[in-house]
Amino acid sequence: MLKAAAELAPVLAMAGFRHPAFAYIGVGIKGVEVLHSIYSEIRTTSGTPWDYFELHGTSRNWIFVPGAFHRIVLDRVSSRRLASRSAEDSQPAAWEGEFEGMRVGWIADVNGSNTDSLFIWHEHEDEILERLHELIWAEYSSSHLTVTVSGLEEDALEPGAVIPTNLIDVLTTRIGSFREAGLPRSYMLVGAPGTGKTTCVQHITRTLGLRSLRVPIGELCRSLGIGGDPNTGPVKKAGEGNDALPLGTLVLAARPDIIILDDLDRAPDYVQDELLDFMELARKSVSIIIASVNNPEKLSAALKRPRRIDDHLEVPALELETVKGILGDQADLAEAMADWPVAYLMEFMDRVRVLGPKAARGEVVELERRLQESQVG
């Protein structure tokens, strides 16, 4: 009706109705129409609140923020305002506000609750990432974090002392030297399951006092847009409605001393190109990257070259003296358990401590059977 009335004003003028009152009426009606148009645009901008941020994103004005930072940012947001809403009040809406004076946006319902995606304005990217770096490490009491489907959690390193092997000593010295020289470095630990790759990384992280970020293979795949199961095909292409953590932004904000990539060879072939991009980005923000693999042949040659993965280190089976060191008072079983993976040795020793040596020794046969079954599988 407002549109029709506004269109009628010039018609009346042409018909000879030139009284100033009609001019004022026409201007007034036109002004109301403009306000109505603006309201309608806010209410229906691009159809969805995601479109509101994606349309601006054609020039990379809005940058998606990992879910791990949502609460940290939104708890500190002021000057909240509704930026765009759908035609139906039941649908989500786009919101904007200020995070410590810097522009941010997010998706929530029209009442401002049930927050979904979070975005930062491109001009404030460096400032916000620097502030998030400070806040994320202050948020957790641990210096070791792991990426999960719900964000970040404290990474509980295995308790207890580690019996340093020759490889651990060499690698600790090597990593420390390159770090002191200010050169980013990436390492690939190659070895069969149970040879102690994870234990080796944990010992190095503790010894050098490093802040660590562990990225399990499932979350690495999710972040690259292929779903949570590394054994299945792509679910979504990266950037197309993918709700996984954008790992690149997470790394830029958290900036740990070391990134730990477990079982990197389990990443499927179709994600190799994305892995290359991630490794290049990570090297710009993190001084140390360590990946553990069982079969390096599954990784592309491009991924294994220097400046992607610099050092390839074989992790051999445990030496007999190391096995004796793990077994302690039960070292008389060392030769019988010489081929046992670290996980099985540690399980046996846990049973010794809790159940007593006699009961634990009585269960050696059961552990041996499970080990053989796992090797057949």
Image: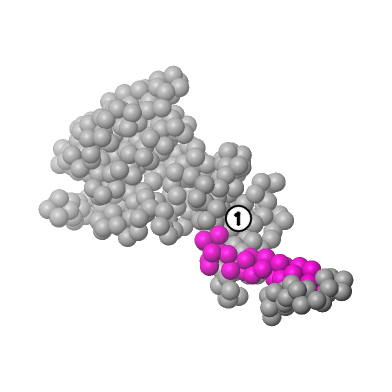
Answer whether residue 352 is visible to the viewer in this image.
Answer: no
Q: Callout 1: few (<14), some (14-19), or many (20+) C-alpha neighbours within 10 Å?
A: many
Q: Which is nearer the eye, 255 or 357?
A: 255
Q: Amino acid at mark 1?
A: Gly
Q: Position of residue 348 (x, y in %)?
A: 27, 48
Instruction: Please name the colour scheme applied to the rendered image.
Output: one colour
- Residue range highlighted in magenta: 25-52
Quadrant (top left/top right/bottom left/bottom right) for the C terminus: bottom left
Left-right relation of 251 to 221:
right
Answer whether residue 147 is visible to the viewer in this image.
Answer: yes
In magenta segment, residue 36: yes
Find residue 105 and report its image quarter: bottom right
Say if 1 sits above or below 366 in the image: below
Q: Position of residue 164 (x, y in %)?
A: 32, 30
* Residue position for label 1: 105
Q: Position of residue 112 (x, y in %)?
A: 64, 66
Q: Position of residue 173 (x, y in %)?
A: 37, 22
Residue located at (69% from left, 59% from top): 80
